């Protein structure tokens, strides 16, 4: 008998009712990564974020601008219009909008109707990232305290590389994937996982809105992507200490240290990497998956940057492929037959999903 008993299934389904899934409404009162800074320029960029169509551009003075991508006249997308100086001219009947989103010219009328325009979204640029505040209702004013500030994204002490996936899946399962790196031994068996990873001891920490799991893989052998640039390849006494932290619905940080555990603590070189996983929901079934990776060693070695980037993004592609398969399975599972059986290492991801669900319910209640 391989199928869980009806009691077990019912209990699992009951437990899932307070956990976010792909149907859970988005959390709008947050900062999300909208783009890399070099994507926003003097060409209109159309992007869907949290199911909202938004157009991005940069003024002649270099300021990034985000406006709702829907003309106030007849809903033609402004991104299909013309960028003229710092204004957008709608490509349908020529209404002109300034950087504030205010309509400042209507060609067919001598005077522009007062107080018409489109929503402007607040943006903040931080290193390679353009963050957008998606707040609605009472929260249209951005809460700068909620902007995740992580120093490696801008510090000269780190060498960074960045990449993007258009992920055909929901952002919640992507966060869950990141919060339990047990999967490294399986999803990443051919890239940066090792067989001992899944059984390595772990510690968790959970508070409201913050979820962490720390896994100590010691002793281990490092895969080439870490072993080669650190000089720790080929030894069986390496340490790999990985911390996964959910910092916000838009930001998951993985921090890993490597060293030779056979050397005394005062005499060991410790190498560190950080990876900012930045999932921005596009729709309920697709996610803009931005990634910035940083290291604190071999800072000026461009060959290391290039090799690590290639190997890492091969591994991240494995996550995208795995989550796409999972989402496809979910889509083809009738709700009545849907259940998930959790284990101890799922605790942080369950906490994270309950947190997102709770906030979505609170926002719906407030609305
Ligand atoms: S739809 Fe934009 S001007 Fe008419
Ligand atoms: Fe992964």
Image: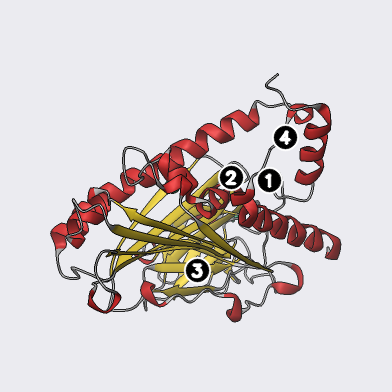
The Cα atoms of the two marked residues, 4 and 2, are separated by 18 Å
Point out residue 153 in the picture as x, y percentages from the top left corner: 38, 72
Q: Residue at x 56, y 73 (%)?
A: 122
The Cα atoms of the two marked residues, 2 and 3, are separated by 20 Å
Task: Tell me: 275 left or right of 247.
Answer: left
Looking at the image, how many numbered discs can be counted on the residues? 4
Looking at the image, is mark 4 or mark 3 earlier in the sequence? 3
Point out residue 212 in the picture as x, y percentages from the top left corner: 56, 63
Point out residue 254 in the picture as x, y percentages from the top left corner: 44, 61
Q: Residue at x 51, y 59 (%)?
A: 55
Q: Residue furthest top?
A: 1
Q: Are marks 4 and 3 in contact (CB under 8 Å)?
A: no
Task: Tell me: 293 left or right of 46.
Answer: left
The Cα atoms of the two marked residues, 4 and 1, are separated by 12 Å
Per the image, the residue denoted by label 3 is 131
Disc 4 versus disc 3: nearer the observer:
4
Identify the secondary structure beneath mark 2. loop
User: Quadrant where the C terminus lies?
Assistant: bottom right
Looking at the image, is mark 3 or mark 1 earlier in the sequence? 1
Looking at the image, is mark 2 or mark 1 earlier in the sequence? 1
Q: 74 or 46, which lies in front?
A: 46
Q: Are marks 2 and 1 in contact (CB under 8 Å)?
A: yes
The Cα atoms of the two marked residues, 3 and 1, are separated by 24 Å
Q: Residue at x 26, y 56 (%)?
A: 226
Looking at the image, is mark 2 or mark 3 earlier in the sequence? 3
Identify the secondary structure beneath mark 3. strand
Per the image, the residue denoted by label 1 is 21
Which quadrant of the view contains residue 27? bottom right
Q: Is mark 1 within 8 Å of ligand 2?
A: no
The Cα atoms of the two marked residues, 2 and 1, are separated by 8 Å
Per the image, the residue denoted by label 2 is 170
Per the image, the residue denoted by label 4 is 339
């Amino acid at each position: 008998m391989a199928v869980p008993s009806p009691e077990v299934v019912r209990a699992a389904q009951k437990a899932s009712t307070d956990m976010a899934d792909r149907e859970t409404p988005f959390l709008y009162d947050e900062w999300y990564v909208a783009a890399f800074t070099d994507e926003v320029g003097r060409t209109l960029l159309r992007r869907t974020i949290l199911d909202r169509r938004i157009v991005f551009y940069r003024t002649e003075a270099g300021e990034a601008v985000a406006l709702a991508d829907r003309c106030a006249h007849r809903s033609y997308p402004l991104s299909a219009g013309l960028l003229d100086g710092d204004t957008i001219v709608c490509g349908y009947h020529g209404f002109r909008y300034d950087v504030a989103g205010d309509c400042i010219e209507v060609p067919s009328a001598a005077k522009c109707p007062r107080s018409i325009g489109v929503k402007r979204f607040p943006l903040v640029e931080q290193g390679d990232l353009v963050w957008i505040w998606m707040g609605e209702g009472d929260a249209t004013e951005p809460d700068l305290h909620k902007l995740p500030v992580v120093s490696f994204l801008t510090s000269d002490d780190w060498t960074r590389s960045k990449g993007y996936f258009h992920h055909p899946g929901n952002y919640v399962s992507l966060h869950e994937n990141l919060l339990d790196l047990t999967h490294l031994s399986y999803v990443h068996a051919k890239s940066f996982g090792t067989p001992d990873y899944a059984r390595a001891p772990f510690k968790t920490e959970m508070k409201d809105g913050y979820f962490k799991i720390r896994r100590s893989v010691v002793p281990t052998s490092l895969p080439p992507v870490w072993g080669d640039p650190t000089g720790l390849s080929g030894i069986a006494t390496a340490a790999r200490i990985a911390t996964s932290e959910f910092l916000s619905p838009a930001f998951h940080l993985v921090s890993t240290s490597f060293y030779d555990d056979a050397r005394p603590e005062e005499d060991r070189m410790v190498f560190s990497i950080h990876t900012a996983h930045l999932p921005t929901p596009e729709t309920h079934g697709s996610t803009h998956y931005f990634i910035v990776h940083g290291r604190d060693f071999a800072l000026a070695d461009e060959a290391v940057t290039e090799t690590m980037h290639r190997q890492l993004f091969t591994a991240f592609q494995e996550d995208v492929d795995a989550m796409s398969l999972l989402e496809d399975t979910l889509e083809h599972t009738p709700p009545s037959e849907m259940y998930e059986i959790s284990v101890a290492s799922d605790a942080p991801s369950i906490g994270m999903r309950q947190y997102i669900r709770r906030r979505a319910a609170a926002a719906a209640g407030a609305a």
